[in-house]
Image (cartoon, rainbow, N blue to C red):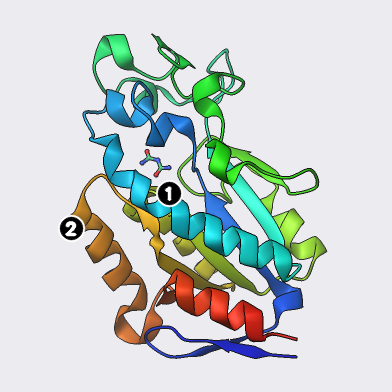
């Protein structure tokens, strides 16, 4: 039975059986010192505030029986899936593939590539490894969602204006209704977080809807 999520620019009816929670890149490489985020000169502590709301939404989504999808940005150890234009950025000693305190930076299988323990995937929850910013590019996310006839995505994670935004734009073009959970997203640049959210819901929701963890959890509790 459809329920309604309080959101901007308008409330959004959704069918829980056709809704997925997509948690973007809540990895040690972005959230902890010594990883990719810090290598680019960012204050990674700014992302910590997104973890408890993410966890609360994750618990509610699991309890409601939603499909939960986790994504991780990262590259093969031989860097064959990393374009030179991406590899060339940042300080030469702290680029993708270089050794760091959490292993090679942004490389699959290294400790820094792991999702933070508070949001660890459960067995059976798809984990989508992506080489790009968007979760649809060069992944099987579209097939995973199609297999469950998913129509609505609840999206959270980091960073708001980079991988969350790119994924929402990709999903919007593919016909999904996307609800971005504002307090469960984070950015190293607070004004970009705000601007990113504003862009999504502007112009009648040109990329989707913006809500918050409390409203999403309430809606998931009401469904049925
Ligand atoms: C970035 C991401 N910011 N997950 N990646 O490079 O947003």
Labelled pair 1, 2 in contact (Cβ < 8 Å): no
SS at circle 1: helix
* Residue 208 vertical placement versus 83 (above, below): below
Q: Is any part of residue 115 visible from this angle? A: yes
Q: Tag 2's secondary structure?
A: helix
- Res 167 seen here: no
Q: How many marks on residues?
A: 2
| Quadrant, the C terminus | bottom right
Left or right of 116? Residue 63 is right
Answer with left or right where residue 1 lies relative to residue 202.
right
- Seen in the image, is 39 located left or right of residue 158? left
Q: What residue do we see at 31% from left, 20% from top?
A: 88
Residue 124 coordinates in the image, percent (x, y) = 80, 47
Determine crowd level at label 1: few under 14, some 14-19, many 20+ residues with C-alpha closer than 10 A. many
**Quadrant of the rendered structure where residue 64 is?**
bottom right
Residue reaching furthest left? 191
Give the x, y percent position of residue 70.
62, 48
The disc placed on residue 191 is 2
The residue sitting at 80% across, 66% down in the picture is 148
Residue 130: x percent and y percent? Answer: 57, 38
Give 42 or 170, whichever is nearer the viewer: 42
Dot 2 surroundings within 10 Å: few (below 14), some, or many (20 or more)? few
Estimate the x, y position of residue 89 in percent, counting from the top left.
28, 24
Along the viewing direction, whichever of 107 and 207 lies nearer the viewer = 107
Residue sitting at 51 percent across and 69 percent down? 172
- Quadrant where the N terminus is found in the figure: bottom right
Which mark identifies residue 163? Answer: 1
Measure the alpha-carbon separation of dots 1 and 2.
16 Å
> Which image quadrant shows ligand 1?
top left
Ligand 1 within 8 Å of disc 1? The answer is yes
- Tell me the quarter of the picture where residue 149 sits: bottom right
């Amino acid at each position: 039975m459809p329920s309604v999520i309080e959101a901007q620019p308008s409330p959004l009816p959704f069918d829980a059986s056709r809704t997925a929670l997509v948690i973007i890149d809540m990895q040690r490489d972005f959230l902890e010192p010594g990883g990719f985020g810090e290598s680019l000169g960012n204050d990674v502590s700014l992302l910590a505030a997104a973890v408890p709301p993410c966890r609360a939404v994750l618990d509610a989504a699991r309890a409601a029986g939603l499909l939960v999808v986790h994504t991780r940005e990262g590259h093969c150890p031989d860097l064959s899936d990393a374009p030179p234009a991406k590899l060339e950025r940042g300080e030469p000693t702290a680029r993708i593939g270089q050794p760091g305190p959490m292993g090679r930076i942004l490389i699959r299988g290294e400790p820094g590539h792991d999702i933070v323990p508070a949001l660890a995937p459960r067995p059976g929850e798809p984990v989508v490894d992506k080489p790009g910013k968007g979760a649809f590019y060069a992944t099987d996310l579209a097939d995973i969602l199609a297999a469950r006839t998913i129509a609505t995505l609840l999206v959270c994670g980091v960073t708001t204006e980079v991988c969350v935004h790119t994924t929402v734009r990709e999903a919007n073009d593919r016909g999904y209704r996307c609800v971005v959970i504002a307090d469960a997203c984070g950015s190293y640049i607070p004004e970009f977080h705000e601007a990113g959210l504003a862009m999504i819901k502007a112009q009648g929701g040109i990329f989707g809807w913006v809500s918050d963890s409390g409203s999403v959890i309430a809606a998931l509790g009401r469904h049925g």
